[in-house]
Amino acid sequence: MKLKRAYYSGYVTDFIEKDNSTIFGEIVRSDSFSSDDLQKNAWEKQIEILKREIQAFREGYLLFEYTIPRMGKRIDNVLLYKGIIFLLEFKVGEKDYPKSAIEQVTDYALDLSYFHKESHDKPIVPILISTNAYEYQQPIEVLKNNILKTYCCNETGIEKYIETICHRYNEPSFIAEDWVNSLYMPTPTIIEAAQALYKGHSVENISRSDASAVNLSNTTKAISQIVESSKKYKEKSICFITGVPGAGKTLAGLNIAIERQNIDKNEHAVFLSGNGPLVEVLQEALARDDVEKYGISKNEALRKSKEFIQIIHHFRDDTISTDRAPLEQVIIYDEAQRAWDKSNLQNFMERKKGILNFDMSEPEFLINVLDRHKDWATIVCLIGGGQEINKGESEGIIGWFEALKEKYPNWTVYVSDRIIDYEYIKGHSFEFLTEGLNYNINKHLHLSVSLRSFRSENISSFVKALLDCNKNIAQKLYNNFKESYPIYITRDINIAKSWVKSIAKGSERYGITASSGAKRLRKYGIWVQNKISPSNWFLNGKDDVRSSFYLEETATEFDIQGLELDWSIVCWDADLRFTNGSFYYFSFKGTKWQRIKSEENILYLKNAYRVLLTRARQGLIIFIPKGSVDDISASPIYYDGIYNYLKDIGIRELTTFPID
């Protein structure tokens, strides 16, 4: 079903001539959320104010409650006039101009500029209207590109400000209907996506749909067809969805889980992940939304969100004590390439659970649990390449296929044609992988384009080239996106902090990240051994010292994998050094660095930096300390190599801030 973007829309002339009750009735009829009396009173007041304040702009086009699905919110009013997009956010009865409200309407402007095709090249003018507030003089300032800073006024200041802007800007007119029907191409964070899907938005409305990106709905449709076929023919099936970092695998998984719940609640579709921070953040975000929307207790809201999104360890604990089939018949397992192998799961079960002689890998155990169903079951494995960062994860998807071949050859396997890429099968052949199995190839089970950075599709390729020491390729890729996706280096952590604070607009999130092995950065105030609360770090506001905004707590690859920031500081320590054209890998033990020789541990450290360098959606700055000549554990020679390598690639350096 196509999303209706506004509750009311029409030319100002028609708006002025219609009686208030007719307009109000149209708005209320379009309100699928059955808003309360407070909201309805606000709409009546807005109609009254706008009929007075926009009388002079009759050729303009007005919209009420224009939907921004990526954010799960609606702009009170949009006025399209003289080639300019005016965003009007009302706070009826408000006597002040709250910072949160200014940030809210600023976010709307940023969203339209980034994701709404017909708004890319047009002036966007956000206005906060606190109806009972005082008047004060404000300069007209540009926030960035085509967006002005949010202007604050009371209910009598709207007409004058719009006239002032129209006299200042002489813009070509555009057809209002083209703007209303414009392609909307959002790339939500996984938190925003989960919240929007949970509220009932479709994946088509919250994800990009341009030709350069794989349509996520095709993947969901393919999985639904597999589930329906499994039900019809009473089969057990397992699907492997592959994709580049940031391509939307987790978004696809969440969408599949929600859609299957909507189609048939008796399937008890559940989204599982071994990524503790991701699960914690998503559960908390959805619970906070439910508390705000329904007024229920936090505990009740968390119980609800935990039924939908679960940590794999809790699911395993619930099913290990019984031989009965679980309620769930559809399981979506995120980052399935990180599932533990037999020896590591055996060790964990013995140490943490007191279970001796546990003789299954995590893939085998999960298949075993779903195989208990008498009729049908489906497992959907979301697979990322080059993201293994924990001991026991280096086999990628091989463990899944070994379990299928050895114990469950009756299961039907579905894969994409990209499963043969090295990062998925670790040098094994496709024939080895699928020998003896009933498999089907479906091209819609691969997501090939990164959606994390809406500014550039080449970020993951650039990071891969950088870490693989392919300097020429890295240079070429960097030059292609350096203006639209800024990357800087600095030797001063305070410059890095000043840069992210100044470049982030509205509620765009920023934070400090470093590898878990970056133990000598503590002297610069970057303490990776201090455990953060992921939900507080990712969800709390600028007034909370535990949030990423405070730039006090550092997130490591374990905290941030699968999640995103808009802007990030990546702190580079001497655990990953560059000398004579190659990277060398180290671990800090006691008082000194020790060379890492294990290929497995080298892979984990390389992937840790891959994770850190691909978390930012809009841009990042890399802090490389200068080191200290009197500190053998932080010698300048450890850091100068990586600094010179990044400079040779062409990455620009900030030595002062603001930029000269």
Image: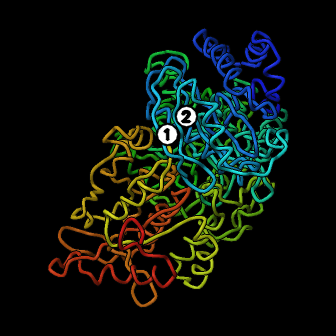
Dot 1 or dot 2: first in sequence order is 1
**Which residue, as the protein is rendered here, is positioned at the far bottom?**
580
Using the image, tell me which numbered label, if any, was put on residue 279. 1
Q: Position of residue 629 (x, y in %)?
A: 18, 82
Q: Residue at x 62, y 41 (%)?
A: 164
Can you say whether 479 is above or below 621 in the image? below
Q: Secondary structure at mark 1?
A: helix
Using the image, tell me which numbered label, if any, was put on residue 495. none
Q: Residue at x 48, y 85 (%)?
A: 648
- Say what amino acid the circle numbered 1 marks: Val
Q: Position of residue 620 (x, y in %)?
A: 48, 63
Front one among 84 and 658 = 84
Using the image, tell me which numbered label, if any, was put on residue 309. 2
Mark 2, other Cα within 10 Å: few <14 / some 14–19 / many ≥20: many
The quarter of the picture where residue 400 lies is bottom right
Q: Residue at x 58, y 75 (%)?
A: 478
Q: Secondary structure at mark 2?
A: strand
Judged left or right of residue 1, residue 112 is left
